[in-house]
Amino acid sequence: MSNLYLPSGYINCDYVLSYRLPVTIIIGGRGTGKTFGMLDWCIEHDRSIIFMRRTQGQTDLINKPEFSPINPVAVHRGLRCTTKPISKYNSGIYLGDEDPRLLGFTAALSTFSNLRGFDASRVDLLIYDEFIPEKHERPIKGEGDAFLNVYETVNRNRELQGRPPLQAVLLSNANRLDSPILAALDLVKVVDRMTKKGQQEYINHQSGIGVFLLMDSPISAAKGDTQIYRLTAGTQFAKMSLSNAFAYDDMSDVRSLPLTGWKLLAQLGPYYIYRKDKHWYISAHCSGSPKRIYENTDIDLRKFARDNPSCYSRILSHKIFYESFEAKTFLTSLYI
């Protein structure tokens, strides 16, 4: 069995965290031990944490014992878990009955910027659970930058003080590849390539990022013979939950095309827009001189959306081809 999994079949957090990378991303099927295992590891190794979810509503919910993912881990270890509000936006997580110790804090990405003056110097790990939103969840404006700001806020001047950087661990199911966090970390293409090649691990020591895709999880394999997955066999839900496939992403219009016969219309940030007949093609390669150049800035991207109102209908009617899913994410994010 791969070092990525324990003999029990669940994820091996000792192995994943042994790389000591500033950012570790774990994407896997449901019930593969991502959240439980990481929280259990932190309790066992006495690590102080921030446990973060996307929205304030989600965070308020997990502050209740009945919905807390930390509570079953504490019960597993014979401990009592309680939360106490620290501010309007976050709570402290405590373990034990008499003189309970502070395990860490809960927080929400959407409201973290309101935690002015929050002392996170004691925090060892930032655990961002379910960082890839499900299709029905509303986007957060500037979601990728919001995460980077959270990391900078918690990390502060640690490295200038001779301390190691903060470890952030991001956990999710394979809901969708067009994640704002993956895009902000320039990982959409990486994860797409890993998925196509069946690659479970990607380590980049220079950037300090590790990605782990739990494609061969023994737990997922075992869960395939349970009622819910017999009921949903072959569906997008089953592929996402068991096969770690980004089944909800439409790849039908992603293809590499020769540029012969295509007319270059414009440059849009790092991409070039071509036209042939009624179709557009979005590519990272340039052939010719674009009539318009839109820089990769908020103002220029808005200008493009304003100048090309028909682009939205082209997206919906599948009249645009994309050289990569990364290119598709870049363009569609301007409209959807």
Image (cartoon, helix red, strand yellow):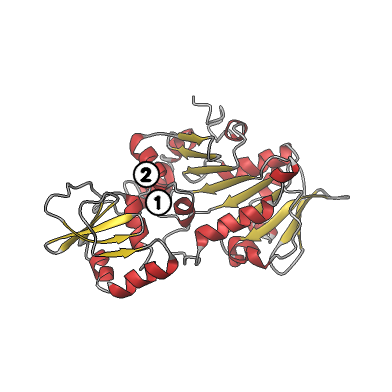
Q: Position of residue 259 (x, y in %)?
A: 17, 50
| Residue 44 % position (x, y) | 72, 37
Judged from the image, the secondary structure of the residue bearing numbered disc 1 is loop
Whether tag 1 and tag 2 are in contact, CB under 8 A, the answer is yes
Residue 97 vertical placement versus 298 (above, below): above
Mark 1 / mark 2, whichever is N-terminal: 1
Against 250, is 295 above or below? below
Q: Residue at x 66, y 43 (%)?
A: 165
- Name the image quarter holding the C terminus: bottom left
User: Going by the image, does 6 lie left or right of 288?
Assistant: right
Left or right for 53, reference 326: right
Q: What is the number of the mark on residue 192? A: 2
Please name the amino acid that badge 2 sits on: Asp
Q: Is residue 27 above or below residue 110?
A: above
Residue bearing the label numbered 1: 177
Front one among 98 and 49: 49
Determine which quarter of the picture holds residue 273.
bottom left
- Res. 181 visible in picture: yes
Question: 180 or 40, which lies in front?
Answer: 180
Q: Position of residue 166 (x, y in %)?
A: 66, 45
Residue kind at label 1, given as amino acid type: Leu
